[in-house]
Amino acid sequence: MRVAIEQSRLGLYGLILFACLFGLGARGASAQENNSPAPGNQKWNYDEIKKTPEKAVRRPNPLENEPDALLAGGKLFQRNCAECHGLKGEGGKRAPSLLREEVRQATPGTLFWVLTNGVVWHGMPDWSRLPEPQRWQIVTFLKSFKASVAPGGPGGG
Amino acid sequence: MAGRRPFASELSLQAGNVQTGISPCISAPVRKDLIRGCAVGCFRIVLFVCVGFVCSSLFCPSSFAQESHYIVTYDHYLEEPGSLEVEYFSTFGTQRAGNDFHAFWVELEYGVKAWWTTELYFDGQTTFGDSTLFTGYRWENRFRPLRHEHFINPVVYIEYEQISEADKIIKEVEGHDVESDHAESNTILRQTHNHELEFKLLLSKNFKGWNMAVNPLATKNLSPSNPWEFGYAIGASRPLALKASPNRCNLCPENFIVGVEMYGGLGDTQDFGLHETSHYLAPVAAWNLPSGWTLRFSPGFGLNDNSHRLLLRWGVSHEFSGFGEMLGHFFGGRQ
């Protein structure tokens, strides 16, 4: 019986910890939502783009002319980015729109740098976990927004 | 683990107990309680996983999991903020001076921030011919101190463990952990509970599609008489293809990641070094499915006589995105 009581006590500790942890997580999520502008509100900070080092800005996209890069980039965008940025890059509660001028005017090298480093202090994880060619495929897809996607219009992905 | 443990030669007197499974000096009513305790522990783990899966499946969309492919080693990537990953892992281990075992654990990994991931573990094990029991829990936190990617990327890892000596998941090897630590029967091992703090520095780098990670670790049993113990884990891995294929597919080479990891103990403050330590070499393979599931498999081979000959591990995980938002609404966050 002593063992059963001990296990129950352990379980209780675990549940208390779990509740604290998720309570904290929920508060964090709520706070993040409360600070987040609604899509289209255009209050997101795009400063990270301006912080890109000059060398990275000039870096060309090696897959720019590869025929499969756009489709593969679309697939990767759907898997990894659409959850926060929206299926068409229109933005959401958790992440800014990628259809804004700041993003559309950014060089491929800039987008690659932001993707690689993330904006960790403001909620965007770094995506260097994806191999470099896959990040360039995503950049190819992001640059396609410029030509084929207008805000509110149809998009790939 | 608690300080220096008895070695195989010191355990020879207890071999009889190991072979018979449960100590003969235990009376029938106590044995009944033990069995009930084991059943309660296992039931709790299974219930916990089922409830977690059902709730998350109902309220959260699945997301593609680009997960770490190692089982023991950590790279520097953290869980995406607001996402919950539910993981189940098994370890089958051979035991020379006793019964083989199957240890298992459930992980609930939550991305609090992009720079902070927290994780809760529930451990259990079955020793064949002996018993099944819940062996404790761990609470792990990983913090990323740097804002950008660097030549080497550090992450600080802090874990609190409340586990019994019967814990056999071997999620890390530290100090003088050796195979004979697990030779005694569960009845004896479960009587000792350890409260430990574990610190790791996770160093990781990507280079031409390869990930390389090195994790030195230091552990302190919170009982004052126990020394600091040290260990390490290193790993290297690479996806089968660096470019993604244009089609959605389960069997695309970019969904498979293969690698190898090595881990072991480095003694403690009283006896630092490789003397009486165990070490393992383990190939790893992971399969990331577009549906959000990740499967992992790793046969680990002991590199000296102090190590288990084989640690066969496998695991399955599923990532639920938007879990934080769902909880936010549940706890009264604004819509």
Image: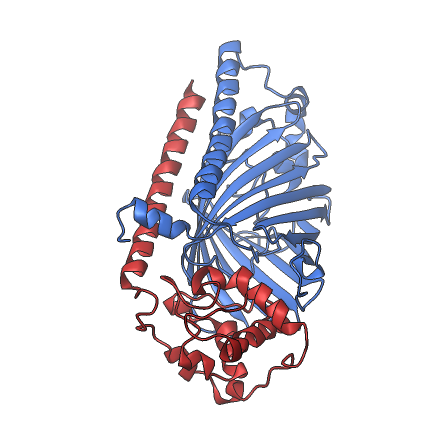
Chain colours: A red, B blue
Location of residue B102 (image quadrant):
top right
> Closest to the observer: A5 or A20?
A20
Give percent across and percent down for residue B184.
Answer: 61, 29
Q: Is residue B227 above or below residue A50?
A: above
Which residue occupies the extreme front position in the image? A153
Q: In this view, does B249 lie to the left or right of A37?
A: right
At horizontal 66% and vertical 65% (from top left) the residue drawn is: B246
Give percent across and percent down for residue B205.
Answer: 58, 69
Which residue occupies the extreme top position in the image? B28
Looking at the image, can residue B77 be seen?
yes
Looking at the image, can residue B177 be seen?
no
Give percent across and percent down for residue A100.
Answer: 40, 77
Q: Is residue A15 above or below residue B84?
A: above
> Closest to the observer: B31 or B329?
B329
Instruction: State how many labels appear.
Output: 0
Give percent across and percent down for residue B214.
Answer: 59, 62
> Closest to the observer: B84 or B275?
B84
Q: In this view, does B288 lie to the left or right of A99?
A: right
At horizontal 52% and vertical 40% (from top left) the residue drawn is: B106
